[in-house]
Amino acid sequence: MTWWRRIWQRSELDEQLDKELRFHIEEHTAGLIEEGVEPSEARRQARIAIGGSEQIKESCRDARGTRWLEDLWQDLRYALRTIRQRPGFASVVALTLALGIGATTLMFTVLNGVLLMPFPYRSPERLLSLQEKTAKATQFGNLWAFAYPNFLDVRRDVRSMDLAAWRHAGGTISEPGDAEYISSYEVSAELLPILGISPALGRHFSTAEDQAGAPPVVLISDSLWKRKFGGKQDAIGATLTYGGQQYAVVGILPASFQIADDRDVELLTLIGQNTQPSMKAREAHPRIGVWARLRDGATVEGAKSELSVIASRLSNEYPRSNEGRTFVADPLQPITGNAGSTIWLLFGAVIVVLLIGCVNIASLLVARASSRGREMAVRVALGAGRGRLIRQCLTESVVLGLIGGAVGMLLMFLTLRPFISLWPGSLPRAQEVQTDWKVFAFAFTASLLSGVLFGAVPALRAPAGELERSLRAGSRALVGGSRRLQSILVASELALAVVLLVSAGTLGSTFLRLSSLDPGVNIHNVLVTRLALSQNVLTDPAQIRVDWQDILDRARSLPGVQSVAMVDTVPMREGNNQLGYWTNSALPPRTELPLSLGSSVTPDYLKVMGIALRAGRFFDASDRMGSRPVVVIDEVLAHRAFGDTPAVGKQLWIPDMGPTPQEVVGVVAHVRYWGFADDDQAQVRAQFYYPFAQVPDGLLRRWSELMSVAVRTENAPLGIVEPLRREIRRTARDQVLTEVRTMEQLAEATLARHRFLLVLIGAFAGVALLLACIGIYGVLTFLSRQRVPEFGVRMALGAHRGEIVALVLRQSLGMIAAGVMVGSLLAYAAGRLLERWVSGVQMGDPVPFVSVVAILIGAALAASIAPARKASRISPVTALRQE
Amino acid sequence: MTSKSDLPQGTLDLLIMKIVALGPVHGYAIAQRLQEVSRDVVQAPQGSLYPALHRLENRGFVDAVWKKTESGREAKFYRLTKKGRVQLEAEAASWQRLTEAVSLIMNLSEGGAK
């Protein structure tokens, strides 16, 4: 009989057992009567012979092997009964747990989606990401994106993998519909098959199309299809104009399509049709991503050794570009930047909150268990084993834990999306954050563990010996041990609260310090926007210069605009241009040059950004093509390059800008290019500016794709966006604004992560402090009540009220001191973590530490005052009578 | 009358299986048989008989059906299963070895051991 049938047929089995035993006794009785024994005496003897029938039945039930389940059932019913008897207590416990488990599960859900979830491609574990690796490392490291010719050679020769390449691009779609700047990718024909993605409509690219001169074709996104073609079937075969060229649409991508974590992919073109010179050069590394899928039966090791063979052959064949160059393959994994450390920090913080919650409940339960001591003793006297009692206590707390967990899951569902939308910047891989079975398993385990954690302490206090003492003295006999235990619980609660408080304090002071820094630019009333120039002028450098000047003039003429400038790389926005420089003509090898951030700007840039001029002059209309090449440097570069000597009039050699040196004509203030938090630690801080007018014709097209327009306005800068958009579209209808931001927004974004962490950890610290105070209040109230007779004796012997208050407070001070001491050690470790993971955090500032610890001690003492005063107000007579 | 000794640990199951092996039999009959064969020497408390039977039933060594006795009353009859027979043979053999070894030592004459 299977065990579950034994459970279901429990009553039937019991009935049969009863019948069997009855039969035995009756047969025995009949036998004895036959031997001549009196019937009543016979029945008595038969009963004695078999022994206590209840004991036999119990042992038979034990023999069924389902005893533990029956006990569990009994314990569950008992637990639910106890919970129903004290709904107030149970709901406080369940709510505390719901908050703790809800928050912990929420963070786990985020962690699971962002950090653990693989890309949503077919068998992602067989996908690899390939890079080039040089023997020597530079400031940028030793890993490089593939050169396109290298990719072609590896793809041709490798046997263990299928390779595909992709490269991020972007451009303006001018037909059909309104001109629109979109994000696109150049991909090799194999990319979609390798990822296991089929077009929703139409077909894949073919390999024959993946080369220069083939008819231009595109795959478009689901949303572009709906926007431009109304989602109609006849979009296949239709044409669209992208980047000034006509393409035939051959397929529609599925709505869920993404490259790595970029879901904003509107268009795919073929990388083989790209005819830029950089695609033919083995020296160039135009940011090509190479992915590969292991063929059936191939291993990563095999693929790696094959790559190294190909690499050494290529380095023999092309020593100039490929000497010391190998290819490395790594599992394809999402890149999440510093979101990972933010998630881990918050996950740690919510676990601390949950722990505090559990400790708090444990101390409440200990207090209750002490008052239930007599009940426990009675149970032991009636034959309950200690293990059985512990199991019973644990069942009760686990039931509470599971109730809390269920409510917590509910809270989690309600808060998950709002929480993600609050993430600073945007949470990478937010679309992967889903509640899957792992989340449920986590919540269940967390509930179970919490239940066991806060249940174990009181459960282990189930009476073992000295039964008669417990029975006689009732609850008070247990107080001695309980006092020590409760003090430990409260102290650990305080210690955990210290960790969160000090972390919040450190983050707070860091945030204050950082946000009071001078960014070097006047961030108020400045609008920055990228601008895509009309496609049909891009081929003519002279026309490009005219058009940009026209755009600047038109923007300046708008009402409310004070000044307008162009700039390629904007401070505190993504993107930068790092160039090596040297102060004399004896240049060291390129990789050993010190680096500086270069920006090409128009003369009004200084005025628009409000950067202070320290020496010399900024650019003017006389700095043109053909005039002497000039640069303006910032204080940091001036100091690094020329020390204390005046920089104006000196020369800088910048190989990327040509062999002739640049003359330094001015020095300006340093701008916090990397934002408030990161600029001080940034590897490349030195800055220089060069006139956009001196960008050579050959580079002008590329530069024009990068330029942004910066506008200083009289009033709120966002008000200028629409007039600007209209004015610029009037010149050519395919000129569009993208990435419209104010400098204030950009500046705030550099501190968004700090603010986010500060607000959340601050809130957790507040909750922790509150819980710890509730804990200390509850425990002191309980302990003082237990000590009422003692206080009575003391007062009868002449103790003042103040002395009683002092007595209680001394007890609480002991707990606080222990908690603060242990907590400080833990907080030090947490501080180390913050220092490593949050830029700008500096340990060793005693102010946040001292102030939050003072707050904690103050709050804890305040929570102790009420029970202490209550203890001092009891009348000695009543107190003594209670004894 | 000689004093009764307790049954060694684990032998009760063996004895019960041995009795049940002789044919379908109900609990009371097993108790009587136990008492007869052990000639009142071995104390087999009737109280431990039923838990032992149920344990054997759980482990699949015996199974049981409700049948009428000769006197026309319903009783639970136990019989040995195939699995039980194998178990009985194994246990009986090991019991045999044990008793032989013990009696071998017990039969050594005083001072006979060198």
Image (tube, coloured by chain):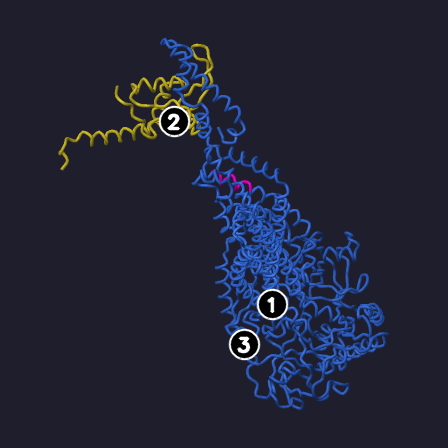
Q: Is residue A731 left or right of residue A12?
A: right
Q: Which residues are magenta?
A: A388-396
Marks 3, 2: nearer the viewer = 2
Q: Secondary structure at mark 2?
A: helix
Report the chain holding disc 1: A
Q: Residues within 10 Å of mark 3 (few under 14, many from 20)?
A: few
Give the position of the C terminus of chain B as an image quadrant.
Answer: top left
Residue underneath mark 3? A320
Q: What amino acid is labelled 3 in the image? A: Arg
Q: Residues within 10 Å of mark 1 (few under 14, many from 20)?
A: many
Q: What amino acid is labelled 1 in the image? A: Pro
Q: Residues within 10 Å of mark 2 (few under 14, many from 20)?
A: many
| Mark linked to residue A354 | none
Is residue A391 magenta-colored?
yes
Residue underneath mark 2? B84
Quadrant in which residue A89 is drawn: top right
Q: Secondary structure at mark 1?
A: helix
Using the image as rendered, state which of residue A435 and residue A285 is in the foreground: A435
Q: What amino acid is labelled 2 in the image? A: Gly
Residue underneath mark 1? A848
Marks 1, 2: nearer the viewer = 1
Is residue A204 magenta-colored?
no
Q: Which chain is the one coloured yellow?
A: B
Using the image as rendered, state which of residue A605 and residue A159 is in the foreground: A605
Report the chain holding disc 3: A
Q: Do the residues marked 3 and 2 share a common chain?
A: no
Up-down relation of residue A772 to residue A394 (above or below): below
